[in-house]
Image (cartoon, coloured by chain):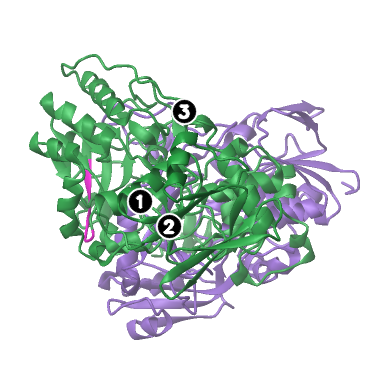
Amino acid sequence: MTNKGTSVVVVGGGVTGLSTAWWLARSGVDVTVLEKGIVGFEASGRNGGGCTHYQSPLFHEEQRLWPQMDELLGYPTEYRRERIVFQVDERKANFADGLSMRIPAGYEWEVLDGRQVRERVPLAGDNAVCGVHLHFGGHANPQRTSQAYAWAARDLGVAIHQHVAVSGFETAGGRVVGVETSAGRFGCDALVIAAGPQTGKLSAMLGNPVPMAAARAEMIVTEPLPLMPTGGVDGNGLYGRQTLRGNLAYGGGPHEWYDDTPLDRPPPRPSGSVLRGLSRRLADLLPRAAHARVIRSWAGVIENTPDGRPVIERLTAPDNVTVATMSSVGFGLSPASGHAIRDLVLDGVCSFADLSKLSSARFKELSGDWRRDLNWLPPQPVMPDAGASL
Amino acid sequence: MTRPETRLILPAPDRHSIAGKTGAPDEHAELVIIGAGPAGCAAATEAARAGVQVVLIDENPVSPGLIGMDVPFHFGGRATGAVQTPERLVEHVLESNPALAEAFELGVDVRLSTSAWGAWVNGPGMRSLATGVIGLADETRSWTLGFDRLILATGARDLNLSFAGSDQPGVMGAQALHALLVRYDAFAGRRLVILGSGDLAIATAELARSRGLDVVALVEARDTPAGDDARLAALAGQGVEIITGHVPLAAEGGTDGVTGLVLVETQAPGRRRALACDTVCLAIGAVPVIELFDVLGAARAMIPERGGHVPVVDAHGATSLGHVFAAGDCTGLGGDAAAAGLSAARAALASLGRPAEAPEAISRPAGPDALAYPLDWTRALLATGGPDVMVCLCEEVTRGELLAVQPPRYLGWSSNAIARRNLATLAQDGPLDQDQIKRLTRACMGACQARRCREQVALTMALGAEVPATSIPLAGYRAPVRPLPLAVLADADETADMTENWNVWFGIVTQWISYDDIGTAREDEQIRAGMPY
């Protein structure tokens, strides 16, 4: 495919779709992004901001790119290097063993005892048992980064249409040639579907269902506290960070499965189910912050595939379509996932990592009852809905 | 390369979801009413007379810590030391509110100094509740209260507009002044300048004068006063100057806060005059307190003549949520709050299947456009005070930074790219959204939970992007709607299922297998080892 004059439509204005658009535009491709709401307003802007995903085939590229992203994008991401994970439960004293079998060679990290944790994490307390200090990875601001991608993409000529819902695709000769939307038809030479929880449904319209289920997860935020030397601190069943402003932003705990999410509007995302559980665990993790006031909570809706692993693949039919779901771990990997998808769209193969195990083909024998089998169903209501209907 | 045969390994059935992990509320009531103003007290009294078990929640007297943070009103550091001992204020709160005393006499379970920081009912996205639930807190702990029916009577709060020096003690809101004078008898000021000349400003001036305070002037941004001529004339006759066509340029002050206010003529910004005062009271407008409606997911609408964003209610106060009713100023400013409370109570009783008189339809009077007036004020303040005035005090965001959609100052970021972006270019990208602007500029992201800046930021956005103020969507409210310490919110009694099956993320063991190990013996080893942490 020659780049000049090629038009790619990206469905989904989250970090994966926006990064893809930005990478494609850097290669001179004419790109249009269609977003049902506001860019980065769903899970892309509602997460812990972690950039440390050593399980992923995109890990090395993630680590290579993050330190450069502010400069490459021209807008701030608030990226900061390093992470400290520590525990306050004696039963987790050996948790570093679980990491040693997973962290790839060539990345520096050290095991900390309780005293070392307290030295490096001023808000930690006497209850700190053990920890690890990763001298790689890091964290960024999801909301600022989402907008940075969007602005950087626009600077390269990408058209981003917000509040536009996709309703179908037009195919001809085994290829997708147009996208039908609430704002009319958009023609295309190639299509990328990176629409979070809606990806499976949209891909199914093209005869390629990708099994996934959506769920709601929550985070809390405190008022600002003095900055710790390393903001990327978590543990005790929590993920999160101290923001550069000083707020503690942490999530974790039970999620709530959804039946479905709509294609044309944001999903409902109430918060409060685990707010007190998060508060308790954060006060335990960082006892010197127990006085800090919680000023917000929020929820995000994210999708998972049945094995929790991404699907990133260029379809064989229609052969000009690339489908991507990051399976609930998309923000931190977004610099690399956009690069990978750009490669699949333009070259048919990722230039920097093997992605063959992320094909949706692995699900071809999946039971039709997989959500029931995995217990991935919404709670059985104990009382009738008193709330508004969807 | 050839594609390896991919062997699908699925995780164990999910035991980490919310299903079954939400405990029963710590206590339960047939009817919970939030807010013990005229609407809430009337509702509580009516329901108690019908034999219903009623819990009436009110956050007054508010803890000194919250008063210091301008929660729930803009107290502006003008409370006396009396607020340091809220327990001593209880008597005064009861004395000043005979309806509350009556509810108490009738057996209503009245909870004072208790914050309602959240409210939930089963609905889309939250289907695990066995009952409607309120999150409550006092200074030391939080707990939950289940309800069959809920009436929100949360009133109104202050609308704040800023000017140079307005972050110092002595600049406050009309609701806060009313609370300190009437409910607490704990106002520290003596000599006031009141901003605004509408009904709220006039009532504030009349109240202050009735308490023996010196009211120097009413200041009006428009060229003509907004309120009733006769009442204004009466105030003028008592020596209160009515100054039109002026807005504050700066509050002057010292260690004890405001000592004077410099006004500027809106049509001739070079012409200034100074007024000596110790308090500047913002009485430009009030804002319906809709926080809990938004947390609950109740339908709402933008109705300028009812005060802006308000819940959708029927003639009896029923909201879009079957078990939730509303009455008083929180449904829109003005009208007979006690009558609305009575009507909401009867509607709630009927929905409980209790015998009740038929609720009367409440007429909700259309007032003047509640957005147009503060918008004129905001425009005049912006034109005269310039871009360097703080629009968000907690996060120290100036008007200019908001208009330019500047990243927060602590990032020290500047680039040509960012310089090309502003509210107007964002508006071209798609309709402006205040939550988006919050995230980019941090305006409204602070510890006061945007009580001091939410409306001002929305109005400034409208001016900056030249779009109608009614087009700016509400910046959403989320629990906790009061800023409460982690240690207070911490759940001491969470269910065993929650404790045992809490996971940092979804607990999908296959998700965390290193990619290179997928399909190898090392995959089995990692699955046996379980989640990494």
Residue type highlighted by circle 2? Leu
Residues packed near mark 3 inside 10 Å, few (<14), some (14 to 19) or many (20 plus): few
Residue beneath the point at 35% across and 39% down:
B155
Residue B211, how many percent across, how many down?
30, 52
Of the image marks 2 and 1, the number of the one nearer the N terminus: 2
Residue pictured at 73% horizontal, 69% vertical: A71
Shade representing chain B: green
Chain letter belonging to callout 3: A
Q: Is residue A212 above or below residue B281?
A: above
| Residue B28 x/y as whole percent | 17, 38
Looking at the colours in the rendered structure, which chain would you say is drawn in purple? A
| Dot 2 and dot 1 within a common chain | yes
* Residue at the far top in the pictured view: B358
Q: Is residue B53 left or right of residue B177?
A: left
Q: Which residue is mark 3?
A: A390
Up the image or down, A231 lies above or below B350; here it is below
- Distance, label 3 to label 2, CA atoms, is 50 Å
Q: Nearer the viewer, mark 3 or mark 1?
A: 1
Determine the chain carrying the residue at label 1: B
In this rendering, the answer to whether A340 lies above or below B30 is: below
Determine crowd level at label 1: few under 14, some 14-19, many 20+ residues with C-alpha closer than 10 A. Answer: some
As drawn, is B467 to the left or to the right of B530? right
Which stretch appears magenta?
A: B139-145
B333 part of magenta stretch: no
Say which residue appears at 26% left-offset and 67% top-offset: B81
Q: CA distance from mark 3 to mark 1?
A: 48 Å
Callout 2: chain: B
Per the rendering, the mark at residue B192 is: 2
